[in-house]
Image (cartoon, helix red, strand yellow):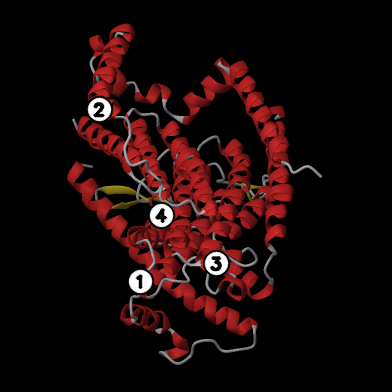
Amino acid sequence: MLHLVLFFIFAAVCVGGAINLLVQKHPINSALSLIVVMGSLAVIYLLLGAEFVAAVQIIVYAGAVMVLFVFVIMLLNAGVEERTPHGSRVATMLGVPGLIVGLGIGVWVVTRVTGLDKIGIGGPEVMNGSEVFGNPQAVGRLLFRDYLLPFEVTSILILIAIMGAVVLARREE
Amino acid sequence: MGIGTFIVVSIIKILIAVLVLLTAVAYTTLLERKVVAHLQNRWGPTRVGPFGIWQPLADGLKFIFKEDLTPPYANKPLYLLAPVIALITALTSMAVIPIGPWISLGSIHTPLQITDVNIGLLVILGITSVGVYGGALAGWSSNSKYSMLASLRASAQMMSYEIALGLSLVGVLILAGSFSLRDIVDAQAGTWLGFIPKWNLFKGQFVAFFIYIMAAYAETNRIPFDLVEAETELVGGYHTEYSSMKFAMFFMAEYANMFTVACLASILFLGGWSGPVFGPPIVQSLLPVFWFALRVFAFIFVYIWVRGTLPRFRYDQLMAFGWKFLLPLAIANIVVTSLVVALK
C-alpha cells in the first residue's frame, strides 16, 4: 500500500518534472527539471528494490551528467531561448490530442505484446522479488559472471567513444 | 521493536545527530581560528568568554542580525535554493554514518546510526555529488562575475576529484566485500600479533588512503585546493553575493562536509570505532564512540594544520594533479589490490 502511494507520488513528480523541462524557457531551469526527473526515477528504482541501480542513477545521472549539463550552460552563459511568434496552425490544434492518442496506442501495444496487462501494474511479482535482483551482490554477479562478455564489449565501446572525443576535441598544433 | 517505538527512536537519533553535528560545526570554526592563530604566533579569539569559547555563539548571533541582502539582478528562486541544497546535502550524509556499535537501553536495542542501509557508501557518494549543485547554482544565480568564475571552478574541480575519490574507495570495498559502512568496520576488527590493528590502512590501502585524503580536501574546497574561494582572486568565491544566514548556511555546509569526510576516513581506513574497551557497562558502550570521535577530531585537526601550512595550488596544477597523478594511481591501486585478493 505504502509502496503504491509512494510510487504514484514520485511518478507524478517525475512526469511533472518532464513536462516542466519542456515548458521552461531558460535552459538552466530545464536542466534542473531534468535532475528532478532523475531523482524521482531513482526513488522508483528503490521502490522496486533495485537499490544499487537507484544509487548509481543518482551518482551518474544526477551527480555527474547533469552537473556537466549545468556546467556547460553556465560556461556558455546560455540565455532564454528564442521562440518564433507563430508556428504551424495544424500542429497547434492537432499536437496534444494526436500525442495522447499516439501514446495510448503505444501503451496498449506494448502491454499486449509483453503480457503486462495480465500481471497488472505493481503486482506482487514486481514488488516482492526485490531481494533477488536489486542488491549490489546480485548486480555484480550478473555483470561479472553471466554477462561478462557483453559487459567488457560495452566498456571497450565506451573507451573508443572517449578516445574519439579526445581526438575530435584536441586542437591541431 | 514496534513501529511506534522505531519512529520515536529514529526521531530521537536524528535530533541528536543534527544537534551534535551543528554544535561540532560551530566549535570547529573556533578550533580552526585558535589553531591557525597559534600556528601563526597569535592568540585567536579570546574576548568572548574564557579562551573565547562563546565565540561561535557570538558569530551565530551576528549572522542572524546582519542585513539579508539579495542582489537585484539575481535569479531569486535559484539564489534562495542554492544554500538550501548545500546545507541539506551536507547534513543528510550523516544519516548513514555509523558512530559506534549497537547499544541497549532497557528493551530497546538499536545501532548508533540513524539508519543502516546496505548501500551506505553509495548513498553518501550520491548525496555529496548532488551537493555540487549548491555551489554551482549559487554562483550562477548571483549574476556576478566572481561568483560565476568560482562556481565554474567548483563544478570542474569537484567533478574531477570525485572520480579519484570514488576509485580510491574501490580497494576498501574489495577487501570488505560490502557497501555497508557497518560491515566495512566489522571487516577491520581484530589485530595481528596482538597489537597491530587490522585496519584497512595496514592491510595495504595506504596509497588509497592518501588519494582519499587529497581528493577529500579538494571535494571540501579546503587549502591547498581552495581555488573556489581564493580570496585574492575571487573576493569570496561562489558565496560572494550572499550575506547573513544564507552565507552562514554555506559556511555550515562546508564544515559539515569536513565532518562527513573525516567520519568516512575513520570508517574506511582506520577501523571505525575499534579500540580498547573496559570498565563498567555504561563506559563500555560509550568508549567506542569516544574512539571514533578521537579519530574524527584528529582528521579535523590535520585539516586545520594543513590550512596553516600549505599555500594554494594554481588551477592548471590542480587539474593536472587530479587527472594525471591521482587518477592513474587510484587505478593502479585497484589493480594491485584485486590481484592480491584474487591470488590469496
Q: What mark, if any, has residue B70 been given in the picture?
A: 1
Cα–Cα gap, marks 4 and 2: 38 Å
- Would you say residue B278 is visible in this rendering? no
Q: CA distance from mark 2 to mark 3?
A: 57 Å
Q: How far apart, in angstroms, are the residues tagged by discs 3 and 1?
A: 33 Å
**Between B317 and B337, which is closer to the camera in this rendering?**
B317
Q: What residue is disc 4 on?
A: B89
Q: Amino acid at mark 3?
A: Ile
CA gap, disc 4 to disc 1? Answer: 23 Å
Q: Chain of mark 2?
A: A
Q: Chain of mark 1?
A: B
B53 over B223 or under it: above or below: below
Q: Quadrant of residue B74?
A: bottom left
> Which residue occupies 37% across, 84% down?
B58
Q: Secondary structure at mark 1?
A: loop
Question: Which residue is more in the foreground, B151 or B179?
Answer: B151
Mark 2 vs mark 3: tell me if same chain.
no
* Residues at circles 4 and 1 in contact by the CB criterion of under 8 Å: no
Question: From what the image shows, is residue A102 above or below residue B304?
Answer: above
Which residue is the site of mark 3?
B300
Instruction: Work out whether mark 4 precedes mark 1 in sequence or the reverse, and give the earlier one.
Output: 1
Residue under numbered circle 2: A96
Instruction: Tell me, yes or no, whether dots 3 and 4 are on the same chain.
Output: yes
Q: For the residue carrying disc 3, how many other residues have a C-alpha within 10 Å: few (<14), some (14-19), or many (20+)?
A: many
Find residue B206 and report its horizontal and vertical position in percent. 69, 50
Q: Are marks 2 and 3 in contact (CB under 8 Å)?
A: no
Q: Residues within 10 Å of mark 2 (few under 14, many from 20)?
A: few
